[in-house]
Amino acid sequence: MAVTSRGVDLAADLGFLKLRNPVLTASGTFGYGLEFEPYMDLGKLGGIVVKGLYYGPREGNPPPRLVETASGLINAIGLQGVGVEAFAAKVLPKLRRIDTAVIVNVCGADDDEYAAVVDFLNAQEGIAAYELNISCPNVKKEGACPALAPQTTFDLVKRIKAASRRPLITKLSPNVTSIVEIAQAAEEAGTDAVALVNTFLAMAVDLETRRPKLGNVFGGLSGPAIKPIALRMVYQVASRLAVPVIGMGGIMTGADALEFLVAGAAAVEVGTASFVDPDAAARIVSEIESWCRARGVTAVRDIVGTIRVP
C-alpha cells in the first residue's frame, strides 16, 4: 500500500516501525483519533498519536484554556484525559479497526506514574509504540518538566525503556538551552526515537483587564509562528543522533512537512493545523505525494536528510 497508483512510494521506515507514509497526527490536537472519523479516512495517515494518558482520569486546567495569537495558538489544556483503563476499554478496541499505526502518548505526575501507565498498556493489543511525554509546558508551574535537563531526561527514559515492551519515542521540549544535549541524553538512555518539538512556554495578556488571557497564566505556543525554530532544532538533533527524529512545529502544508524531512526528520507530526482544517493531515499526505511526483522523486524517504548546508 506504500506505492500509490501514481508511482510515488510514500513509506517511512523508523527502523522499529514501518509507516504507510511519514505523516502522523500530534498528540493533544487530534483527540483519540475517533473524533476525526467524520472528516477524514484515518487509514490514509501514517499513524495517530493519541491524546496524552495518565493512569487515571484528569480534568486539566481551569478555563480559559485556548488563546489565538499572531500566527499561532496558545493552549493550557493541562493534559485532560480519560485515563488508561477507560482508554483500553472504550477507545482502543475501535482504534484497532483502523489500518494505521496507533501510538500512545504516555504521561505521569511522577516517574512512578509513567511506569504504571506503561505497565498497564503493555498488556493491551493494538499499540505500535509509546510516545513518552516528558515535555508538556502547561502542567506544572512555569513549564517545569523532566525534559528541561539532561539528567532527569536520562533517568526517566532509562526507567521507562526498561519497563516498556514496545518501542519508545521520547517527546522533547524546545524550552531548553541545548536541545542536542537533551536529545543525546534520551538516546544514551535507550530511546528508539525522539520527537520534537513540543510547544513553547508562552502567555497572552488582556490589555483592558490587565490580566492573563489563560486561566493557567502560561500555556504552550504552537502553529506557524514556531516553525522556523522547530525546524532549526530538528536539523540540529538529526545531525547529531543515530536514532530517528520525528519533527513537528507549525506544519500546515505538504511543503512544510517536506522541509522537516529534508532537514533530517524521518517522519512528521501535524498538530495545530487540524484545528483549522480537520482534514489537514490527510491533505498534507496528498501534497507530499504531488510534490514528489512533480519532481520525479519516486520514494519520499530519498529526500530525508538531503539538506545542503554550506
Image: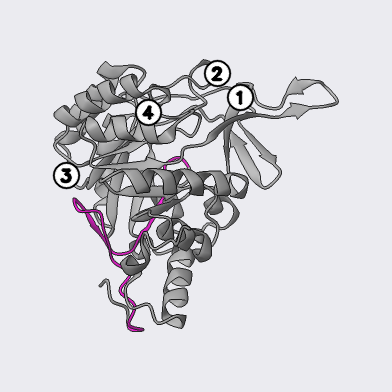
- Amino acid bearing label 2: Glu
Determine whether 210 is above or below 165 in the image.
above
**Residue 18 located within the stretch drawn in magenta:** yes
Segment tinted magenta in the rendering: 5-28
> What residue is pinned by disc 4?
134
Cα separation between marks 2 and 4: 15 Å
Cα separation between marks 3 and 1: 37 Å
Cα separation between marks 2 and 1: 7 Å
Does dot 4 land on a helix, a strand or a loop? loop
Specify few, some or many for label 1: CA neighbours under 10 Å numbering under 14, 14-19, or 20 or more. many
**Which one is closest to the eye, mark 3 or mark 4?**
4
Determine whether 244 is above or below 173 in the image.
below
Q: Are marks 3 and 4 in contact (CB under 8 Å)?
A: no
Does dot 1 land on a helix, a strand or a loop? strand
Query: Most extreme residue toward the right, as rendered?
Result: 208
> What residue is pinned by disc 2?
142
Cα separation between marks 2 and 3: 37 Å
- Amino acid bearing label 3: Glu
For the residue pair 278 and 19, the one nearer the viewer reads as 19
Q: Quadrant of residue 86?
A: top left
Tag of residue 125: 3
* Quarter occupied by the N terminus: bottom left
